[in-house]
Each structure stands twice: as structure tokens, then as C-alpha cells.
Amino acid sequence: MAEPATKGPAYTTILVRIAELRAWLFLIVLIVFFETWARLAYDVSFVLNTYNLQSISVFATAPLLLALGQTFVIISAGIDLSLGFVMGLASVIAAHTANYVQAVLGLPPFLSMMCGILAGIAITFFPGLVNGWLIAYLRVPPFIGTLGMYGVARGSAYLFAGGMTISINNDWYSAIGNDRFFGVPLLVILTAIACIIMHYYLSQTRFGQHTYAMGASQAAARRAGINVKNLTMKIYLLSALMAGVAGALYTGRFTAGAPQAGEPLLLDSIAAVVIGGASLFGGSGNIWGTIAGSLVIAVIQYGLVFINVEPFWQFIAVGAVIIISVLVDQTQRRFLGGRQVE
Amino acid sequence: MSELAPILVVRNVSKHFGGVQALNKVSLDVFPGEVVALAGDNGAGKSTLIKAISGVFQADEGDIVLDGRQVAFVSPQEARDSGIETIYQDLALADNLSIGANIFLGREPIRRLFGFLPVLDRAKMAEAARTTMEMLDFHVTRLDAPVAAFSGGQRQAVAIGRAIFWNARLVIMDEPTAALGVPEQLKVIALIHSLKAAGKGVIFISHNLRDIFEVADRVVVFRRGENAGERKPNETTSDEIVRMMVGK
């Protein structure tokens, strides 16, 4: 009965490890590239520059917050296309609520801000629960269900905003979006806390474990007694809530609520998760990868501006990284001899 | 075996889907340490019966008695909690998780980090994986590897290991050898013998009559949702079983 414990020689394990870390390798390559370019062309440092680090990290916060929720969704073999406009909706509701509470109810700025943030996050229960319900109970494919919600959230956000952006005049709220704590932007600190909490949920709880199981095989999860419908609801709710957090913080950063706040960020969020090592077929991915994926996108976008290249190159660069990442993922699967497409 | 009480008694169970009578007053007993093979053509009602037993759906009529207690499971989870483990043809494993995580899937152990933060107890899962797999004579070196990295027979052993670890009274196996090569099939047959030796009741569904004769203590034949008779393997031939299956 002596059989080898696993298929394939040991070097495949090393290749798999490298493939898992590809987002961090991309990040290092990009930083080396921009550093070299900046030194040669302008004789300045790209990395050893506090302003650059602050800008890149702030730049990465909004897509990363969306990508955190998207990570759970993609691991469960779903996709959430509504996140961008759910974020916009949250941003508009947060701005309106903060203004209303301050001007009409006369509460102090800090409480007004808190009411705005909570209202912005609370409104996302609606799209989150509806997405989950459509997908879990009515068996609508995630792509279609959340595409519908994309339209509903988009229209609602513009209607609530009256087609404009909603300015706020609240020092507390703008401080959340723009102040620094010992040089670290508050947005970055808040996003880092969100990352730690999401990492905990994904890697250390039954909820996270069941999300992985469901992504690998929904039938296996169901037969193991996991309430797959309930789990699906929770995953899409979590994803919407993270978009709510991103929207509420956006309002602070730009001192305005905007329906289109998250419009360009949806694809970035999916790209970050995929670059971070998740498979769109479900079952794999993790928060560390998603963080690296978000940083890769932020470094490309900021770095190209920094070295004074036409900004349109960023789309090509991000696109190329996504494609390379997916190719690495498929190669890795072939090495592992695991399932391809099921 | 007559002095032992049966683990499972199925009496006159019927089930229909719309106008289709999938099961018509079917009966079945399983005793401790006994392997009962269900034989029958496609659509004979074998899968319907095991789904009724394992709580996937409820029978329309009839009684299912487990350890002397009448049961009506409303979910597979409830059936598992009562000691009925079902092992499916396609294994029902999460390929991306470790052996331990699969054994504990749906009932993961939790420990408290720093005395308050609940986290998955991976050490406990790995330890359970190691001891259970050793019991089945699989010596696994990489307990953190996803089960996708293992062979078909090893994966079948993980599914069986789950049943053993949770101390199932009754193990239902639906075509456990269907997707396997011959050496792996032999391995599964050996695993079934070890379940039998451990005093479990086993219901075994297979199209492979050689496997049935190899492992079963009794063969119960279904035809068109009804009992078509039962035989002991040493008192019958595969020709007779086939004749019972097709009704000639």
C-alpha cells in the first residue's frame, strides 16, 4: 500500500508557491522599473519619497476596499459587478445624511459625520441582500444578477444626487479623508484595519473556510451540511458593505458625494483580485494577494504619471498584468494536475 | 446476525416525483457489520432510496427507523448528526482544501487565540487527518496539501475517513469505485472491509457485479422502484442477479 503521498515531484510545489506570490513579484518588478526610470531620467527616487508613498497608498484604498469584498465573491465562484455604483450610492447617501443631520437636525459635525458614514454603509444592505437573494434563491447567475443591480444602483445614486455631486461642509468628515496620523493617511489606516478584519474572516473562520469549499464545489459544500444559500447571502452582503465603506470614505476624501464615485473602480477591483492570485473559477485567492494586486494597479497608475508617460498607457499596462496573471494561474493548475474548468 | 438489532430498518417507503413513482413500498434492513449491496438498473430507485435515507428529501410514505428510533430527516446535516454518512460517486470533497479541512467540513473545530479570538483549529484538523488516514493505511506526508494533489483512491479514502472520524453508524456509498482504476478499486474494497470490521452498517451501490460479490453480505435487487428480491452472494450467481434486475 506504499503509494507516493502526492502526485508530481517536489519542484512543482516550489512553482506553485512562486505562482501564489506572483502579485508581490509583479509589485517588486514594477517598483524596480519605476525606480530605475526615475533615477535615470530625472535623478530622483521613486520609492524613497514620502509624498509618493502616501499618494500611492491613498490611491490604492478605494479599489482595495472594493476588492476585499470582491475577493470573497470570486473565491465563492461568483462575481459582483454592482460594487462600483453601490459605492457611488453609499457616497451620495452619506453626503446627504451628513448634511441633513447637521443643517436640519443641528447635530455637531462629528455626530453628523458618523450618521453620514453609518447611513452610507446601511443603504448597501439593500443591494447586498437583493444580490444574494437573486443568486442564492432565484438561481440567477451572479454575472446577470449583479449586472442588474449595477443598473439599479447607478440609477438610484444619480436620482438621489439629482444628477450632481453633493458637497459637504464638515471638517471632521474631510479630516477622515485627508488627514494623516504620524505621516500615515487616515484612509490608509482605516483600509489596513479593514484588510486585517477581512483576512481574519477569510482565513480563520468557518465563514471563510466554507467560502473556499463552496467555490471549489457547491455540491460538496451542500452535502457537508453547509447552508449554501445563507452563505451566498452573507458573501454578497459583505461585498456590498465593503463598497459602502469605500463610498462613505470617498465622501470624506473629496468632501462630496458622487454617484460615479466607484465607476472606474469596479474593473480595478476584479483585476486586483485576479492579479492577487484568485481564480475566476472560484476556490482560490486570499487577502494578501488582493492587497498586492491593488498595490500593483496603484503603482502602475501613479508611476506612469510620475515618469511623465501618457496616462493612457496605464490601461495597457494593467491589462497586460491581468493577462499574464491569468496565464500563470492556468499554468499552475496544469502543474498541480487539478481541475481546469468545471 | 439475527441476534443483533438492525441499525437501519426501511419499511414500505414510497416516493413519487410528479407522476413518476420512483419508489413503491420498498423495504430494506441493515445490520451492524453488514454490507448490503443495492443492485438495479438505472432508474430502479437505488439513488432515490439513499437520498430518502440520508435526508436529501423525505419519503412520501413508509417508515425509516435508525437504531430503533423512527426518523424523518429534513436535511443531510441532520442525517449526518444522527450517524449516517453518505459517500458519493463524485466524492463531494472540496478539492482546494486539505484532508483535515475536508474531514471537518461544515463542523470545523474552533480554538480561542489569546483566550478570546475564535480561530480555526488547524492543528486539530491536521492531527485528525493524520490518525484517520493512518487507520486506513494511507501515510500522508503533506497534511496541508489540497486534496486535489492526491490520487482518486486516496481521495476516496478521505471521504471514507470522514465517515470513520465522525463515528458514523451507517455508511452509504454510491458507486464508490466508479471513477477509479483497478488498483484503486481494490483499495476501496479493502476500505469497505475495514468499515465492516469496525461494526458499521454499509449500504453499497454499484453497477459492478464483481465488486458486489467481492464485498457484500447481502444483495438487494431493485426493479422499477420496487423490491425484486434479495440473495446472499454465495447462494447466487451474477446471471441470476442480472435476471432479477431486468425482470426475466
Image (cartoon, coloured by chain):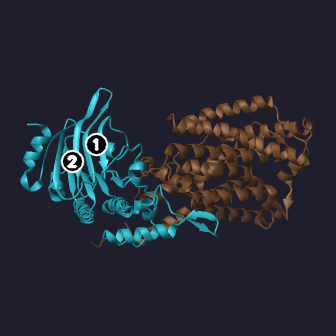
Chain colours: A brown, B cyan
Q: What residue occupies the far top of the structure in this picture? A: B19
Whether tag 1 and tag 2 are in contact, CB under 8 A, the answer is yes
Q: Quadrant of the N terminus of chain A?
A: bottom left
Q: In the rendered structure, which amino acid carries the disc numbered 2?
A: Leu
Nearer to me, A301 or B142: B142
Q: Earlier in the sequence, mark 1 or mark 2?
A: 2
Locate residue B211: give its quadrant: bottom left
Q: Is residue B167 above or below residue A253?
A: below
Identify the chain of the residue marked 1, using the numbered disc in the image.
Answer: B
SS at mark 2? strand
Locate residue A154: give its quadrant: top right
Nearer to me, B165 or A301: B165
Residue A336 in percent (x, y) is at 42, 61
User: Left of A22 or right of it: where is B6?
Assistant: left
Residue depicted at 36% across the width and 62% down the height: B167
Q: Residues within 10 Å of mark 1 (few under 14, many from 20)?
A: many
How far apart are the alpha carbons under marks 1 and 2? Answer: 10 Å
In the picture of the structure, the residue carrying the numbered disc 1 is B49
User: Left of A65 or right of it: where is B147?
Assistant: left
> On residue B231, which mark appears?
none
Locate residue A302: give its quadrant: bottom right
Residue A174 in percent (x, y) is at 87, 49
In the picture of the structure, the residue carrying the numbered disc 2 is B38
Residue depicted at 18% across the width and 59% down the height: B3
SS at mark 1? helix
User: Is any part of residue B152 visible from this angle?
Assistant: yes
Identify the chain of the residue marked 2, using the numbered disc in the image.
Answer: B
Q: Residues within 10 Å of mark 2 (few under 14, many from 20)?
A: many
User: Is any part of residue A327 visible from this angle?
Assistant: no
